[in-house]
Amino acid sequence: MMRQFELVERVKSYDAGADEDLINRAYVFAMKMHGSQLRASGDPYFSHPIEVAGILTKYKLDAASIITALLHDTIEDTPATFADIERMFGADIARLVDGVTKLSRIELQSDHSKQAENFRKLLLAMSEDIRVLLVKLADRVHNMRTLHYIRNPDKRRRIALETMEIYAPLAERIGMSEVKNELEDLAFSQLHPDVRESLVARLNFLRDKGGDLIGRILEELRSILKDAGVDAVVSGREKSPYSIWRKMQMKNVAFEQLSDIMAFRVMVTSVEDCYRALGVIHSRYPMVPNRFKDYISTPKPNGYRSLHTGVFGPERHRIEVQIRTQDMHDVSEMGVAAHWSYKQGQRPADGKQYRWLRELLDIMEHASNPEEFLEHTKLEMFQDQVFCFTPKGDLIALPRGSCPVDFAYAVHSQVGDTCVGAKVNGRIMPLRTSLNNGDQVEIITSKAQTPNPTWERFVVTGKARARIRRFIRIQQRTQYVDLGRAILNRAFKQEGYDYTEKALDGVTKIFKAGSVEDLVVAVGEGNLTGREVISAIYPELKNAQQQKQAQSADGLVALKKSKPKGHSYAVPIRGLIPGMAMHFAGCCHPLPGDRIVGIVTTGKGVTIHTIDCEMLEQYAEAPERWLDLSWSQDPDDKDQHTGRISMIVANEATSLGSLSTVIAKNLGNITNLKITNRNPDFFEMIVDIEVRDVKHLTNIIAALRATPAINSVERARN
């Protein structure tokens, strides 16, 4: 365990102005507070905060961070309070200790929702001061180093998984690759011990088989760079077992096929020398295709800069070479700590300066619950990057597999919400197109556009998914409110009453609704019926309604046989968004002009059927689920609806061409075509066509019947 004077000397070695007295007081205070507490290893508990402080001195952090490390467990595990810390060490250190204390509770939670909620606290604390994360990462590094002392294997696995899923990606995001690599390898040894042992055995075999292979490659690289006049320091290393395993999983390749098990680093004095060294290596050795990456001209989001290339190097071995300056190397290893602002005598910057953290905070604002937030955050942190450009040349970093919608939301939330199209490298492309490194993307927007719920199927960034889901939630609630009011209005009128929300106010507690609007939403969702609400408001109607229900089967028959009258009891439908409060049935494909009826489905709103749909028979015994609907009479309604037709077509060379031509001439759009049966003479097929209404579909059917190649056409039912 590091002694008091050793810790002070370490801090003073890089920060001569550090408050020595305050560090000494923190050391003594923490030792006194932890007293005789022991860790799982049997060591005094106080050894843990000392080790955490020691880890931070390696990254030359300021005295406040070192003191926070010494005190970070005192509020959680000792009688010390926030007020005690503030009185003895000042408001700044008390705030940092409090931030780390709140985060420490993550480790105590096995419940997923509690862990997710605590992760939200982590981001909020980070946004106030990034030093909170640095102390927490050092705390996690030491806990992982001693994880094997914990006897409960489930607890060890949970902590290792949390480290792999949350802390290692966060370390990578702030550029601390050394911390990230150690956390990943320690977690990997707990999560997949057999795999790790196998990889270590293979690495040992290669090392024994190759003898001093790394030494010979280093000597040759140094020689060719020196001969070319490039002043460079060359070093070599093996990749960690976890990074090898991850690459094998991602690329689905065997151990022997990896080209960068051995990585060599070339350190030069300037950016110009980086490119000179690259030219020397490429002129001497063949490059492995698609293995060159220039992170100097396009740095990673965490500030990482370097040149990477794969070559068939000395003795025809495939190797990876990284070329960088000393400053680039410092940022690569220490990330945000490499440019710690106390060195310039300034107050350390808060976390909001980091774009990725601002985006995570934006996701937190729009996620509906902690679990959804954690899901989106993992999407945001885990995936490899692609780098794309705006028309002005600004660089946008995205996860691999991103599409123009992800790009639009990365530019600005409003740009994403109003996106209607995209040009990729000057060409109009579908919004679900996967973007590649170097693509220039121009987003086309419209003020009339809103997020499309179908986008959620192909976006990959957490920010885009959170915004789209938020829009769906708001839109769904709005539609459920409108639908619920229409259902209640109809129910009131049927009983001879006028609908008022004041009448609902008295029964919200009966249905355990937080407000009148929540009660209306419950009716719109189908969790309550209008009849149940009316019965609660007017209990005397209950017996009369039971008699009506007994005669309901006859009433449904009458409903089917009656002619459309447009009576006031019918609920008008308009502004439908697929997947929202109302859904068109896939069995009968209702169109404007059809007589329609709704079936209320618990928790899903209303499914719309044509009145003659055979599927309605299964709901004959549940009259309370039926809802009489009518199409809205909006002359400006330009919505397209899907009509389905079945046809028999001659098996001739021009048949499909004739079919599509007739439909196109009549302004229909084929959205799906399925051949259900074929023989030497005929094809039987189902065709879905976008049309305005029944009349439009009828005109298309008439035109198809007049086409010689088409034997028969009918509107498909069920």
Image (spheres, rainbow, N blue to C red):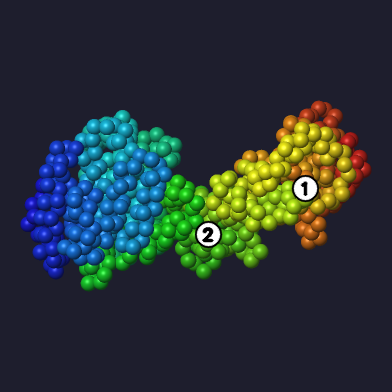
Count residues near mark 2 (Cα–Cα under 10 Å), then give few for <14, some for 14-19, many for 20+: many
Q: Nearer the viewer, residue 646 or 452?
A: 452
Q: Residue furthest front?
A: 540
Q: Quadrant of the C terminus?
A: top right
Where does residue 332 sit, x and y in percent of width and height? 30, 56
Q: Residue at x 58, y 62 (%)?
A: 443
Q: Residue at x 31, y 33 (%)?
A: 154
Where does residue 701 sit, x and y in percent of width and height? 87, 44
* Residue at mark 2: 409
Please, is residue 47 above or below residue 390 in the view? above
Q: Nearer the viewer, residue 589 or 115?
A: 115
Mark toward the viewer: 2 or 1: 1
Element at label 1: helix
Question: Is residue 370 found left or right of 4 in the rendered image?
Answer: right
Using the rendered view, name the quadrant where residue 306 is placed.
Answer: bottom left
Where does residue 460 sit, x and y in percent of width and height? 51, 50
* Residue at mark 1: 494
Q: Residue at x 72, y 43 (%)?
A: 541
Residue 350 in view, yes or no: yes
Q: CA distance from mark 2 to mark 1?
A: 48 Å
